[in-house]
Image: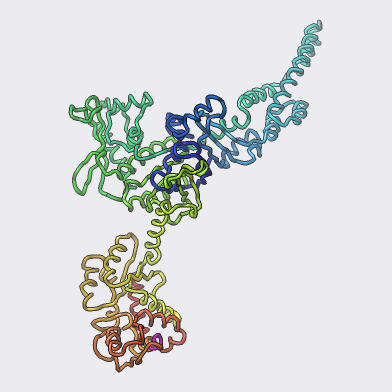
Amino acid sequence: MKLVTFEIRDFKSVRYSTPVEVGDVTCLVGKNESGKTSILQALYKLNPVVPEHAKFDVTDEYPRSEVEEYRQRVEDEEIKAAIVVRAKYNLETEEVKKAEAMFGEGVLPEAIVKLSKGYDNTLYVDLKVNEAVAVSTLVKNHKLPKEVAEAATACQTIAALTAFLDADAEARQEKYAAAKAQAEALADPDAKTKAIHEADLLAESEASKKLKGLLTSISTTGLSIYIWTTYLKPTWPKFLYFDEYYQMEGHVNIEKLKERQNAKSLKSPDLPMLGLIELARLDLDQLLNPQRTEDLVAKLEGASNHLSKQILKFWSQNQHLQVRFDVRPGRPNDPEDMRNGTNLWGRVDDTIHRVSTLLGSRSKGFLWFFSFLAWFGKQKKTKEPLILLLDEPGLFLHAKAQSDLLKYIEDELKGHNQVVYTTHSPFMVDPHHFDRVRIVEDKSIDIKEPLPTEQAGTKVFQEVLEASEGSLFPLQGALGYDIAQTLFVGPNCLVVEGVSDLLYIQAITSLLEESQREGLDQRWTVTPVGGSDKIPTFAALLGSQKGLTVATLIDLQRKDQQTIENLYKRKLLNKNHVLTFADFTSTAEADIEDMFDVPFYLKLVNGEYANDLSKKPKESDVATGNPRILVRLDEFFGTNPLKETAKFNHFRPARYLIENITTLKKSISAETLERFESAFKRLNALLK
């Protein structure tokens, strides 16, 4: 059974949520106070994993401004109790087949069930059934006497079939009683035996009695409710709601925990703690009355090892932690409620820092993650279907840990459990699945004037165009982060200084490949970073990402020598991943422009700036001086300035080459192509 839509009415800040479409993973995004939590809490009460949480309370949960008016109208019978949550589920094929095995193919024409519940705390089931199919199948399967079965085919409903069988049984009883009396009056024993046998044939058949018994059970609730209760309800997913209030404290008094458990008065932190104890395969009674110290020690050590493997494999923030348990009698200065009896303490060993701390003293992010996995782990062991409702799941987690949580949802939960979670963090919005996002807004909090009732309160919608700027911010942040990660970054990232480098590399690669020579491998993503001063930062950011191959092909100037050396001396990149153009020009300094012969590069400059030149630079004008052609050109234009406001920009010659590559390619020397090909071969050899 899979939840496909739900809607909430008259619950806290929600007047009418509008229908909310639900998939395998659904993300409710909204600002603080928008009503995200109210949406989840209302949905949770439809079928919670903790039965004590199932009741709707008018005083606490009906919109406060109208609660007394509502209560009075219900008492006066002007209106019925408000329905808070309506949910629609698609039925799985196996669920439908179970009902069809008893009532026939087509008895559930839509394979959909709609469930609702409100302040009267009654579950309403809307399940469309085809009673004619059910009647026909029941008659066929129960093998009624031929004449009864033929007459029963005229029935189209359970009620009609029940009435027919009752009438038939009554008529048969009269005939049977009369025939039996006549038989008993016969004096001839043989004739009497024969007559009694013939009378018995007139009585109601056992098949009819069995079918009537089933029909009586069905008629008590109706066919749709009977099918729901018998075949569908057992597979109805329970909701597991989890927020920060369910975080465990990490220690507990065992006797008092058992008391609360028996009295069904567990506190929120008790639930994940019980999950943790169960996940560790500990038994509270055994902890209270161990028969041998070594048995207790072995049990606690085994639980610690098992728990560390099961839970900490999902926590990537610190790989050097181990959870362990300790059982000790209460002491006078222990926390209140733990000063008598036996206490169970959860501790976390940090093997790097060689310290041990109480589980409850770890970071809030760790406790949230740990508590959720413990509580969820306990529920999974029941084998019951679950839908997870996670309220602000990454609230206390670092951005990287939030990414881990998204990965956990994607890899471990999706496909096994539907997940509905709320967030206002960009890092909890998967930019690859914006289709999962639903916007939650309460426009009432953003304006001073009251809104009409139909527009007031929390609303949920899927169209981004309807969202306010504040609600869109997490989506914008997620999209921006994804663009930053993927637009110019791939698994193999070649860092260059500017866009002109990118254009030259693309142009020469195309020429080399056209001649069946080696250009830059397409697996490289060329990433311009906007200057040599940004390269160390960019290399550090990229180098921290697992699985990336990062290399540079950059300019070499004397002033940048130390910066470039630091890329590998500070272990930002491997030394053989730091390439400069000077490595291929055999000069002390070099830009990408120096990979070309001087006459050809001047051809690009003169072609691009044809209308701006007061004097065309010739090879003899830039033959001596600085090893870099760009510096020599700057000196030339210093004495021969461009016309009007034009300024020399090394991007424009690169663009000119791209735009005129067809006519210019014949002018590129073999030496130039050789230099570029040597660079590309060195880079391609770095790919895994």
Q: Position of 582 compared to 372: left or right?
A: left
Foreground: 634 or 409?
634
Q: Nearer the viewer, residue 303 or 66?
A: 66
> Residue lying farthest bottom?
620
Q: In the rendered view, does 173 fall on the left or right side of 648?
A: right
Q: State how many labels appear.
A: 0
Q: Is residue 236 above or below residue 203?
A: below
Residue 28 seen anywhere in this rendered image of the structure: yes
Above or below residue 240? Residue 595 is below
Image point 79% across, 10% down: which residue? 183
Residue 630 against residue 36 in the figure, above or below: below
Percent coordinates x, y for residue 482 in the rendering: 39, 59
**Measured from the top left, where is residue 663 in percent x and y?**
46, 87
Assign the C terminus to one quadrant of the image: bottom left
Region rendered in magenta: 606-610
Residue 419 seen anywhere in this rendered image of the structure: no
